[in-house]
Image (cartoon, grey):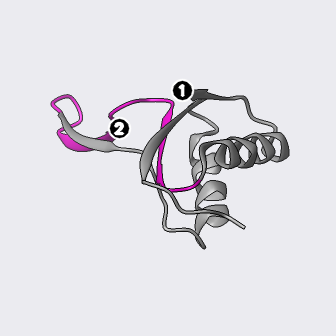
Amino acid sequence: MIEQEKKRYHILYSRIADQQNLKSKLEKELERIDSEVFIPYMEYYRRGDKAVKIKPVFPNYTFIYTGMDPMELHRLVRDIAGKLRVAVRELG
C-alpha cells in the first residue's frame, strides 16, 4: 500500500503541448492520495490586444505536492508517460 511521508514538491518537465494532458492524468491517478498537481499561471496585459492574457509562469513544468514515496511516484509518472506516449523528465 502507499505509505504517506512528509510532503514535498516534485517537478516534471515535458513539452508544453503535453502539459495539460499529463496534469489531468496525474490528478486522476493521485486523487485517492492527499496530493496536488498544478501548473502555476500568471496574468499579464497585452497593450496591442488591449486584453489581459494568461500564461504559465514556468513553461513546460508541472508541479506535484505529495507525501507519496518518491520511488513509487517515479514509477507512476513513468507508467503514465508510457501510456500517453509523452517524454517526461523528472527533476531531482
| Residue 91, x across and y down, in percent | 54, 26
Magenta residues span: 46-68
Front residue of 21/50: it is: 21
The amino acid type found where label 1 is placed reads Leu
Magenta span includes 64 = yes
Please identify the quadrant where the N terminus is shown.
bottom right
The answer to the question of whether label 1 and label 2 lie on touching residues, with beta carbons closer than 8 A, is: no
Magenta span includes 38 = no
| Residue 2, x across and y down, in percent | 66, 64
Mark in the foreground, 1 or 2: 1
Asked which secondary structure carries label 1, the reply is strand
Asked which secondary structure carries label 2, the reply is strand
| Image quadrant assignment for residue 88 | top right
Give the residue number, with chain letter if any, for mark 2.
Answer: 55
Mark positioned earlier in the residue sequence (1 or 2): 2
**Residue 90 falls left or right of residue 34:** right
Give the residue number, with chain letter if any, for mark 1.
Answer: 91
Front residue of 63/21: it is: 63
Classify mark 1: residues with Cα within 10 Å, few (<14), some (14-19) or many (20+): few
Q: Look at 20% across and 37% down and name the residue there.
A: 44
Front residue of 17/38: it is: 38
Residue sticking out furthest to the bottom: 32
